[in-house]
Image: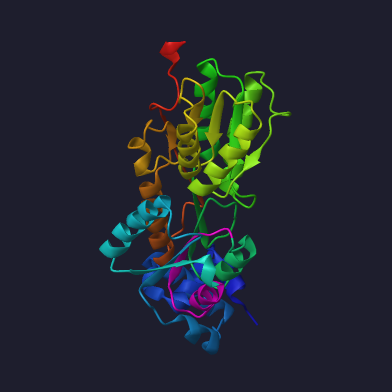
Amino acid sequence: MATIKDVAKMAGVSISTASLVFNHPSRVAEPTKARILEAARLLQYRPNGIARDLRVKRTDTIAVLLHDLSGPFYSELVRGVQEIADANHYTTIISHSNRQDAVGRLLYGNRVDGAIVLDPSISNTVVVDLAAQGLPIVALDRDIHHDNVVVVSADHEGGAFAATQSLISCGLRKILFLAGPEQSRDSDLRFLGYQKAMLDAGLDVVTTPLWRGDFTEQSGAFIMERILEHKTLPEAIFAANDEMALGVLQVLREHAIRVPQDIAVMGFDDIRIAQYVNPKLSTVHQPMYELGLEAMRQLLRLLNGEPGDSKILLGTWLVIRDSSPVLSEH
């Protein structure tokens, strides 16, 4: 008996596209639809009626799954998603990992037409399993290969490399990296960029301690207090995100340690408050709003039965403000 896989192979399309013809035919271009239906006729393929009925109900709703709803990064991302979703008459449901039971019902219960995933607690295995069942997914900052999944990322490694190079070019050598949580791929990539710039400059990264926070301002402040207990300040601290960098600045201010004269501070993300704190925070701009826009654009393509772009990398760029020296000063 022929399967949907056989139909897809004969028609020269992905399994997810072939499935769309029998579940959401309006989302597949007419020439492609005709080719798939002809392959099904020749193979005498008959879709499973029960399985089909589970997926025919269109909800005009997409899920946006985040690790945390409170951070300033996520508000910009969601704003970009909603702008495209609203223009195309889709409702968005925002959820986070504190309710894994609700997330499971949302994704496996056919309550949404597609999903945008930026939540490390949802494993790649789950994402691929959902995609294989026909749920279009855009995954942010992941490494996944599947016909029904598009990966959209920012250039974390390149941005961190440029930030570290900037500090080095100002004559700074003892640069401490303040990492994020262990399960954070973003933090790992930013560390790789930092490490590459340090090694390219012939600087030691082996004996430099790696401090790790949880991307919150509180963790940045806590770690800065622990660093001060060692009585030896590094020349610069590069925090893996702006919120931890703000915690670092708070403690330095409380201890009357001058920034950047005594120590430079660099962040990552360029959240809005970064330009209003004192001193204004030097950072790497991550295109948060644009990530949301691009994620929703790619999801729409999948929802319409069109092939996604597989993997998209958006650029990041350096924003030098008052918390780090500029080259002209050296």
| Between 6 and 136, the one nearer to me in the picture | 136
Where, quadrant-wise, is the N terminus in this rendering?
A: bottom right
Residue 5 lies, with reference to residue 147, above or below; the image says below
Q: Position of residue 136 (x, y in %)?
A: 48, 66
Quarter holding residue 130: bottom right
Q: Is residue 4 magenta?
A: no
Q: Left or right: where does residue 197 sit relative to residue 63?
A: right
Q: Residue at x 51, y 48 (%)?
A: 218
Furthest residue to the front?
255
Q: Residue at x 64, y 25 (%)?
A: 232
Q: Position of residue 189 (x, y in %)?
A: 59, 41
Q: Which residues are magenta?
A: 100-120
| Between 222 and 126, the one nearer to me in the picture | 222
Residue 192 visible at all: no
Number of marks drawn: 0
Q: Position of residue 97 (x, y in %)?
A: 53, 66
